[in-house]
Amino acid sequence: MPPQRIYYGWVIVGVMWLVSLASHASATFTFGLFVLPMSNDLGVSRAAITWLHTVRLVGNGGTSFLFGPLVDRFGSRLLVPAAAAIGGVSLILASQAGEVWMLLVLFGVIGAAGVTAPNNVLINVPVAKWFIRRRGRAVAVVAFGGAAGGSIFAIVHALMIGNLGWRGTFLASGIIMIALAVPLPLLLLRRTPEDIGLLPDGDTPRPDGEALATPTEEVWTPKQALHTFTFWKILVAYMLTSFATGAFVVHRPAYWTELGFSDGLIAAVFAVDSATFAVVALATGLLLERVPARFIGVAAMSTHGLAIVLSLTVISEPAIFLTGVMIGAGAGANTVVQNTIWAQYYGRTFLGRIRGIVLPTAMLGLGLGAPTAAMLYGVFGSYRPSFWGQAALLVVAAALMVFATPPRHRSRPTA
């Protein structure tokens, strides 16, 4: 037999792996490291700085309504390079900003460009369209790229901030993002396997024209999806999860600094967090082929909540490392589940449109969590009240996911 060629879907996965890694140059994961340096340099409150993170996330959520249908129709071949270029240039300009309002505008542009937010439409929807049976592992590989980026930039940004300041760090990061995330997507991305004469998962057609072992997917339109209770259970569960974890991830460096832990130790915890994220994301991709997605989501949300409780009740170096492991594990599993469950439940055909409806709520939660925690810190002089509230929200999110069973069509969909 002639040697089989590598399925082109894995080329798509490799390109998106690199883009996912490069997106972390924009401090998606490491923004917490910038809060205190920027606050001190600009002479503004921590709450004012955390609004930059919020504006970026809300900007991405706002444009996902537009990008979802565009990805369904045209793919990400032009959208990803354009978004990466806009994001990189905006980071470079941010390094020269002298006022917070300038940074707010630039971070809004970075977010609106669409490629830097977690679980964004431009990176994850194209991958899901190339796979059905192996979708979990494909999404997991791309998530691993994000974890690698988080691990690398946790160290790189900590070192750069110490030596170049936050401005020099933004300047260098913008250049890195453009170099890594523009050329290859422009050359290699394609919309769907069917566009180049292939089938999902690389399956081979039988003589009668049908695919071998390719599962049948139901087609749900956005309107049909919106009329299922399952849609709203998952949406609210991930909005609450995003609110809680977004607040904790941004403010934990400041919380640990106030407890007396060194910057080097905190950066090491960030690296452990990302490394755990990577391992668990890959494991989740395989596990999704055997275990219902909602049960893995429940475990991930519960792990997040327990990590926050641990950080509040046990103050020691081993405890903060264990917190990092738990946050990484919960985030790794949740990322893969969140980018898989919508396609599993509602199919590939309108996935971009459906994710474009869902993503703004997650980004709103992620964006509002950090400034809410900062405002509560200003009221109570402590992060503890907000952290306890975040743990409680994760309990509610996990309970919703337990009952998020696969939807059933009331009638056959029409074209």
Image: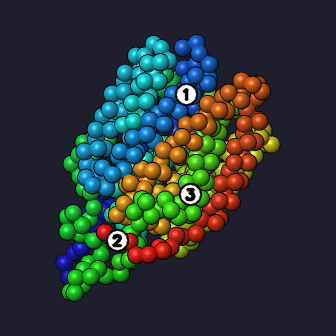
Residue 67 x %, y %: 35, 46
Crowding around mark 2 (Cα neighbors within 10 Å: few <14, some 14 to 19, many 20+) is few
Name the residue beneath numbered marker 3.
232
**Rounded to the nearest whole Å, what is the CA distance between mark 3 and mark 2?**
23 Å
Q: Splitting the image into 4 quarters, where does residue 134 fall?
A: bottom left
Q: Secondary structure at mark 3?
A: helix
Q: Is residue 75 visible?
A: yes
Q: Secondary structure at mark 1?
A: helix
Vertical placement of residue 31 versus 221, above or below: above
Q: Tell which tag, 3 or 1, sits nearer the viewer.
A: 3
Residue 284 visible here = no
| Above or below: residue 20 compared with residue 111 | below
Q: Which residue is mark 1?
A: 51
Q: CA distance from mark 3 to mark 1?
A: 27 Å
Return the residue nearer the eye: 21 or 230. 230
Amino acid type of the residue that numbered disc 3 sits on in the rendered structure: Trp
Q: Within 10 angstroms of label 1, few (less than 14), some, or many (20 or more) residues?
A: many
- Which amino acid, mark 2? Thr
Which color scheme is applied?
A: rainbow
Q: Amino acid at mark 1?
A: Trp
Judging by the rendered image, the residue that carries numbered circle 2 is 414
Give the side of residue 14 with respect to residue 289, left or right: left
The image shows residue 91 at horizontal and vertical percentages of 39, 27
Q: Position of residue 77 (x, y in %)?
A: 25, 49
Relative depth, front residue between 346 and 319: 346
